[in-house]
Image: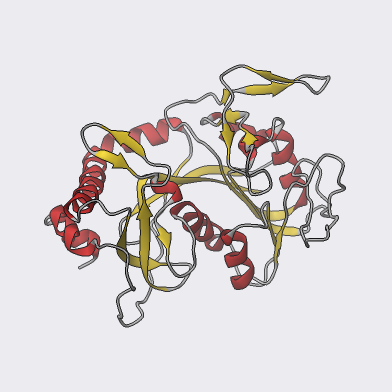
Amino acid sequence: MTLIGRLRRGAGSIVRGVAAPGPAPEKPAPRVPRPSWTTFSGQADFDRWSRDTAADADFRAHVERAVLDAWQALGSPDGYRLPGVCTVCDDWATFEISRTGGTVYPEVGIVPNWREVQICRRCGLSARMRAAFDAVESHLRTRQERLWIAEQLTPLYRALADRLPGTIGSEFLGDDVRSGDVDDRGLRHEDCCRTSFRSGSLDLVASFDVLEHVPDYAAAWREARRVLRKGGVLVWSAPFRADLYDTVVRATVDDDGEIRHLLPPEYHGDPLQLEDGILCYQHFGWDVLDGLHEAGFREAQVWQTWSLEHGLLGIPQRVVVARA
């Protein structure tokens, strides 16, 4: 019986799997299953699924509350760990969970920022990054295929490059840098709206928590379609409002290059701008699927996953998948 199955018989048993930080348990290497993804073709599809699986949502909340209760039972250490399996490491794993970036709720105390914690102690990838890794690997036919990911300074890029030799990583180094150029640090510059790649030269394009910082994100979709071969795949994530159809535009750029804020400015962390962060221009809604079709993609879906076994708690991890 899986860990999820055992928890369905009594979610409180999770307390036995929670401990203060320490060495990972010694166990025989498992046959690592992949996380299960649910796919949606639009908001109506998602709303129907949400109604039909309301009991599962209650169960997920019950499990997460049990984890928080276990944390409290341990005397509220600064960090704690959950056992599971990591599909990046292909092995048993210990996921570290901390207060960093958490939110205080009077009734339960600090709720972790699940998406950015649950960090595997071996590979160093957070829940968001491990879900992204699995989404990418799930769409590759072989490990020799050519893929571009719009990041190069992250553990996610390093994990993909180690596993997949055809991985190309990049960062955005400034408006005055030419796409394809490499600086003294070995960082490659690519503007996702005007890349250096030949048309039809890539098997997969990946962009995680990038497009919310691109004012003309539709141009980035068109560029991704241009560089992908027929049947190639774009996999991306960004702040996504599953309760809304229309994308929420927070800021725009005028013709003269001036930024116009429509909502209070929101800044996200950026490895190249550690102090200032980077402006978020939009939170996406379900209209992105129509936009991807308009950009030339044949298929577009939202994928989501939640898994205690894989250390993917919190709001389900979501990616958008579009096929050229």
Q: Is residue 47 visible?
A: yes
Q: Which residue is drawn at the image coordinates 78% and 55% (left, top)?
A: 200
The vertical placement of 302 against 26, above or below, is: above
For residue 258, which quarter of the picture? top right
165 displayed left or right of 289 = right
Is 143 in front, or is 278?
278
How many callouts does the rendering have? 0
In the picture as drawn, the residue positioned furthest to the bottom comes out as 28
For residue 48, which quarter of the picture? top left
The vertical placement of 142 against 10, above or below, is: below
Q: Which residue is drawn at the image coordinates 67% and 72% (left, top)?
A: 165
Q: Pinpoint residue 144: horizontal percent, then vertical percent.
A: 67, 72
The vertical placement of 157 against 285, above or below, is: below
Is 323 in front, or is 65?
65
Q: Pinpoint residue 52: horizontal percent, then vertical percent.
A: 27, 38
Q: Is residue 53 visible?
A: no
Q: How is the image coloured?
A: secondary structure
Q: Which residue is drawn at the image coordinates 83% and 19% (left, top)?
A: 256
- Classify the position of the N terminus by image quarter: bottom left
Is 175 in front, or is 217?
175
Q: Which residue is drawn at the image coordinates 52% and 56% (left, top)?
A: 135
68 displayed left or right of 29 = left
Q: Pinpoint residue 305: horizontal percent, then vertical percent.
A: 40, 50
Q: Pinpoint residue 68: horizontal percent, then vertical percent.
A: 24, 48
Is 27 in front, or is 227?
27
